[in-house]
Image (cartoon, rainbow, N blue to C red):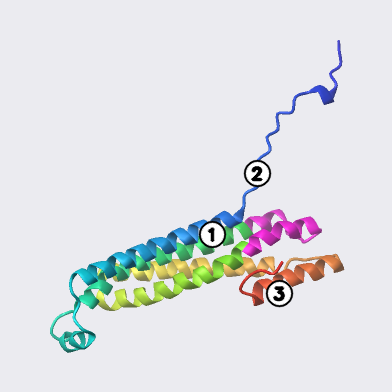
Amino acid sequence: MTDIDPMDEPDFSIDRPEFNPLSVTVIVPLTLIILMLTYAAYVVYDLKQQAVPEPSENIKDFDQKPSELFKAIDRMAFGLFLLSEVGQVFLCGYSGLQLNRFLRQFPVMENSEILERLKPLVRTNMYFVPVGLLFIGVALGTGLFCLYWHDLLEKGVVVVLWFISTGVAIRCSAIENRVRDLECPGPGLKAEYEAVCHSWLQRMFPDF
């Protein structure tokens, strides 16, 4: 029986490109922002088509009937709120899931390879922060408008989504704190790990 040299065996392995978190960091938030801007631009265009009166006239007529400006904000508010909440929950939830998966795989910062695996996740989390703040601001403003002016169903949706997004944010924050508090036995590695965590907490964008 002829022995087969392992070197002669065909290699069926497939080189798969590593997933690049930057694609999610850029594409998804940018898509949501474009949707929001498109929606707002449509309302502004519709507003101009209806020949909006001067602001002074809007103030005079406010007690008598809603101005065209108010109607435009009213049409826009709930849709922008939904888009903002979806964006906020997605960014926070995605980052939290990635960091939680990292914690399950690497409960201890044992070597530099583990730190290199962590860095792209931290960068993604940091890039998400300014976009997330934009979504939070829009969701807060439009949500308050809906609570004051809209019907009971939309008020209920606003409150429920606020609870969901707050819960997701709290959970994500707890996971981030656990990642920043990993045991790191090597003194040299610990200094680099702490520098990454310091940048994570103190800077808007990563410097590593």
Report helix, strand or loop for mark 1: helix
Quadrant where the N terminus is found in the figure: top right
Q: Nearer the viewer, residue 39 or 74?
A: 39
Whole-percent x and y of residue 35? 38, 61
Q: Is residue 134 left or right of residue 58?
A: right
Q: What's the CA distance linking mark 2 and mark 3?
A: 30 Å
Q: Count neighbours of disc 3 (C-alpha within 10 A) and say few if under 14, some if 14 to 19, many if 20 or more.
A: few
Closest to the camera, between mark 3 and mark 1, is 1
Q: Earlier in the sequence, mark 1 or mark 2?
A: 2
Q: Earlier in the sequence, mark 2 or mark 3?
A: 2
Whole-percent x and y of residue 201? 65, 75
Magenta part, dominant SS: helix
Label 2 with label 3: CB-CB less than 8 Å:
no
Residue that appears at 69% across and 69% down: 207
Q: Is residue 48 left or right of residue 130?
A: left
Residue that appears at 37% across and 77% down: 141
Q: Which residue is mark 3?
A: 198
Over which residues does the magenta segment extend? 100-123
Q: Which residue is mark 1?
A: 26
Q: Which residue is mark 2?
A: 17
Report helix, strand or loop for mark 3: helix
Q: Nearer the viewer, residue 122 or 72?
A: 72
Query: Can residue 102 be found in the magenta stretch?
Result: yes
Q: Earlier in the sequence, mark 3 or mark 1?
A: 1
Q: What's the CA distance linking mark 3 and mark 1?
A: 23 Å
Residue 100 in which image quadrant? bottom right
Q: Count neighbours of disc 1 (C-alpha within 10 A) and say few if under 14, some if 14 to 19, many if 20 or more.
A: some
